[in-house]
Amino acid sequence: MQLSLIGYYSDFVVYPLVIAILGVAGLIEAGEEGTPGWIGTVLVCLGLWTLIEYALHRYVLHHVPYIKDLHDRHHVEERSPVGTPTWLSLGVHALIVVSVWLISDFAIASAVGCGLMLGYLWYVSVHHMIHHWHPSHPSYLYTLKRRHAVHHHIDDDANFGVTSIFWDRVFRTARL
Ligand SMILES: [Zn+2]
Ligand SMILES: [Zn+2]
């Protein structure tokens, strides 16, 4: 939805704080013995986020009524502050953390939450940079910017991944 500038930028303040607090609490709970497993769970969930990012963009942002209209607007007005409000995305993450906590324990739930939220923060950061920055060529960011521009302006059935092209290659939607 249309966000105020404070609303648009609040992800970049709120998420690092929440991730840091949840991470410290989770590592204390996991203890020295549980730390390698905790870090492993974070990394697995970080990887899982890239698949969630692909699926959300391909099937939700481009197909669900109302959300599709907002996303279509982003495709045209790519620099205007249209996005998901922090309270909404954070609420979904909180729901996931509490659900995992109920069926397992806090250490695992905090690791799942940190992994997914790190992925989400990386996604919103990269998406902001590729629309507002002018990365030099060649660079990781330049490649992502070029691929995302193809999705925006040439073929919106391709390049759904923003932070990587991996799942587009897997599902044959990559267009370079
Ligand atoms: Zn975009
Ligand atoms: Zn799109």
Image (cartoon, helix red, strand yellow):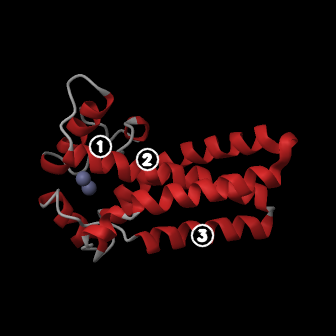
**Label pair 1/2, CB-CB below 8 angstroms:** no
Q: Residue at x 33, y 70 (%)?
A: 7
User: 148 above or below 53?
Assistant: above
Instruction: Specify which label sits upstream in the sequence, 1 or 3.
Output: 3
State the residue position of label 3.
Answer: 94
- Between 97 and 53, the one nearer to me in the picture: 97
**Label pair 3/2, CB-CB below 8 angstroms:** no
Image quadrant occupied by the N terminus: bottom left
**Residue 53: assigned label:** none
State the residue position of label 2.
Answer: 122
Bin the neighbour count of mark 2 within 10 Å (Cα to Cα): few under 14, some 14-19, many 20 and up. some
Tell whether 162 sits left or right of 33.
Answer: left
| Closer to the eye: label 1 or 3 | 3
State the residue position of label 1.
Answer: 159
> Callout 1, which amino acid?
Asn
Instruction: Specify which label sits upstream in the sequence, 1 or 2.
Output: 2
